[in-house]
Amino acid sequence: MSENIESVLTEKRVFEPSEETARAARIKQADLDAMYGKAESDHAGFWADLARSELHWQKAFSEVLDDSEAPFFRWFADGELNVSENCIDRHLEDRGDKPAIVFEGEEGDTATYTFRDVHREVCLFANALKAKGVEMGDRVVIYMPMIPQAVFAMQACARIGAIHSVVFGGFSADALRDRINDCEAKAVITADGGTRGGKVQPTKKGVDDAIAGGCKTVSTVFVYQRAGNEVNMTDGRDVWWHEAVADQPAECEPARIPAEHPLYLLYTSGSTGKPKGIQHSTAGYLLNAVVTCKWVFDLRDDDVFWCTADVGWVTGHTYVAFGPMACGVTQVMYEGAPTIPDGGRIWRLTQNHGVTVFYTAPTAIRALMKLGDDFPNSCDLSKLRILGTVGEPINPEAWMWYYQVIGGERCPIVDTWWQTETGAHMISPLPGVTPLKPGSCTRPLPGIAADVVDEEGHSITEPDQGGYLVIKKPWPSMLRTIWGDPQRYKDTYWPKFDGKYYLAGDSARKDADGYFWIMGRIDDVVNVSGHRLGTMEVESALVAHEQVAEAAVVGIPHEVKGEGIFAFVVLKGERPEGGYDEKLVKELIQWVGKQIGPIAKPEDIRFADNLPKTRSGKIMRRLLRNVAQGKEVEGDTSTLENPAIIEQLQGRS
Ligand code: WTA
C-alpha cells in the first residue's frame, strides 16, 4: 500500500525475561492471558471489576460505560468517590507512618512526609482553599516548582472537588496567563521561587506578570515560601500558604465527587492554534493510574519509586501525584537540575534513597549517556529492579545503555507509550512477562484496544507496514473533552474512520510478533519519492553513529523526490566551526544510506550545540522545518527551553 508509512528500521535483538524476574512478577503469563481473554469477551465488565476492586467508592456505581453520546464517553457515572481519599486516607491505618514522599532539593536539603503528614498538609490546605471561597467545580491553577507542596495542592483540590490545572513552572508568564484565562481560574497556587541549575527562579513574579496582563477571574493567589527570595504581595489578593493554613483544622472531610466530575485540566500545545485544555475525569482516570502502576511498574509495599517527571506534565500527574500515592508506595521527588553539581546526581539520588523502580524520558537517558559511564558505575544501583521510559521513541542505542549500564542487564525496561490524552500507559511491556525489543513499546495492555490501521481504517495485518495508531474502544482514563471546546475535541481525536476510533496522532507499525513500534507523530512523516518515512527511524540511524549524540530530521521540499530529508545533528564532541563540516556530513549521509537504505539519505546536515526543545524535552520540529526551509521561524516559541538555539541554527550566531 503506497500511502502506508514504510518502515526501514529493523531491530532484531530480543531480551527474554530472566527466570528470576519471571518468578517474581506479580502478573504471570497465565494471568495476563486471562486478562486479555476477559477484556476481549466483556470489555466494559473487565473495567468494572477492576473499578470495584481497586478503588474505594463512597457510593457504588451501577452504570458502567455510557456511549450514548460518543465520542463523549462516561464511565461509572452514577458512582461517587474522592481521589484524595483513595490516595491518602486509605493508607492511614496500615501505612500512616510510612514515608509517602522523600524529597531532596538541589542544594541537598531533604524532607520526608509520611502518609499521615501528607494527610495533615492536604487537609489544612484544602480548608484554606475553602476559606477563600474555592468550591466544587471551581478552577485552580497551580504554578509551582517540583516540591511536595505541588502534590499537596493537587490533592487538596481533589479533596474538595476543585478542578486543578497545573502549569509547568518553567513556562512564561504569557503562557500562564493564557491558561488561567482559558479555564477562568478563581485561584492560583504558587511559590516565591524554586531552585534549578543553581539559580532561583522567581515563580511568584511570573504569576504577578501573568495577572498584570489581565486575568480578571483570579481572586486569590496562595504563595508557598520555598526559596526565600523577595516577592511582592498584593493586598487582598495574595496570601502566604503558611498564614492561610495557620488557623485551619487538620481534618477535612473528603467531598463526595461524582465519577465523571473533572479531576483536572492539563494544557498541551497542538501543532497549531491555542493550547488545548485536556479534561480528565475522577474515577476512570484514577482507575487506570492505579492499575498501570501495579501492572507496569509492579509497585509493591517495599518499593521506592522515582518518576523524574515534573508535575507540570501528565507523567507527573499520573505517576507522581496520583498513581503511586493511591498504591501507597514511597516515592522520591527531586527539585533541581539532573547535572548539579555533576552528572552523577541522578545516580547518587537513586543509590542514596534506595530507588527500586525508576522512570524517566529518553531525552534524559541520552543526555546522561553522553556524560559517560563513570558516573553511574561509581554508584551502587543494585536495588533497581525495573526501569521505565516515556515521551518519545527510545532509540535502540540509548535503550542498550540504559539496560546495560543502569540496569546491569538485570532490570526489565518498560517502554511505555501513552499521551496526555490517554491519562495512563496504553502500550507497554509487563516486567518479567513480556520479552523486550529495544525501541518497541511491545503490546497494548489488557483492556486497551490499540491497533494500526490504514487510511480507510482497516487493520493492517501485514507485518511492518506503517499506519495510524488508533484505539478502537473507549477506556476509563481517556480524556473526556477539550475544556470549553467540544467541537475541537471531536475534530482533533475523532476526525477519521467515521468517528469510531480514537486517533492518537502517531504513526506506528506492528511487527510479525504483534509488537508495536512508534514511528513518530503523523505530522513528523517525510514523504521521499512517495515513500513515507518516520523521522524517528532516520534519527535513530544517525544516533547510532559513534560521533552523534542527538539528531532531528525534518522534510524539505525537493524537486524530484517531493520531499527530501534535512538533519540537525548534535555531536558528542565539539560543534564544527560554523556549524558545518563537509567531510563529516558526507560520512553521515553515507552512514544513513548504509543503515537504512539510499532512500533515507539526508540531503544535508547542519550541526548545532543543541536542538530546540520544549521544557518536557520534545524536539520542536515545526521550528526546525522553518529553519531547514530557510524561512523565518513562525508561531509560538514561548514554550521553548532554549530560544537562543534558533539563532545558531539559522547560522546567525
Ligand atoms: C510520544 C507523554 C514512542 C508519542 C506521556 C505520543 C512515545 C506523545 C512514547 C505524547 C513511547 C510517548 N514511545 N513515543 N514510549 N511515549 N510518546 O502528551 O508521540 O506529552 O503521542 O504524553 O509522546 O506526549 P505527551
Image (cartoon, rainbow, N blue to C red):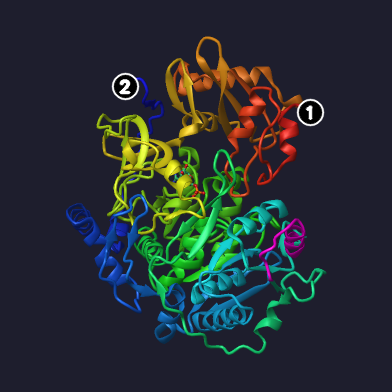
Look at the image and tell me whether residue 638 can be seen: yes
Q: Residues within 10 Å of mark 2 (few under 14, many from 20)?
A: few
Which residue is at the front of the view, 352 or 11? 11
Give the residue displayed 31% in from the left and 30% down from the top. 456
Give the residue displayed 48% in from the left and 80% down from the top. 98
- For residue 217: magenta? yes
In the picture of the structure, the residue carrying the numbered disc 2 is: 1
The C terminus sits in image quarter: top right
Q: Residues within 10 Å of mark 1 (few under 14, many from 20)?
A: few
- For residue 92: magenta? no
> Which one is closest to the eye, mark 2 or mark 1?
2
Q: Quadrant of residue 553?
A: top right
**Disc 2, SS:** loop
In the rendered image, residue 103, in percent from the top left (x then y), is placed at: 60, 70
| Callout 2: CB less than 8 Å from ligand 1 | no
The N terminus sits in image quarter: top left
Q: Hey, which residue is sitting farthest top in the picture?
A: 560
In the picture of the structure, the residue carrying the numbered disc 1 is: 652
How far apart marks 2 and 1 lie (CA) works out to 43 Å
**Disc 1, SS:** loop
Amino acid carrying mark 1 in the image: Arg
Amino acid carrying mark 2 in the image: Met
Which residue is at the front of the view, 589 or 100? 100
In the rendered image, residue 477, in percent from the top left (x then y), is placed at: 39, 58
Look at the image and tell me whether residue 569 can be seen: no
13 to the left or right of 462: right
Q: Quadrant of residue 261?
A: bottom left
Give the residue displayed 34% in from the left and 55% down from the top. 73
Span colored in magenta: 203-219
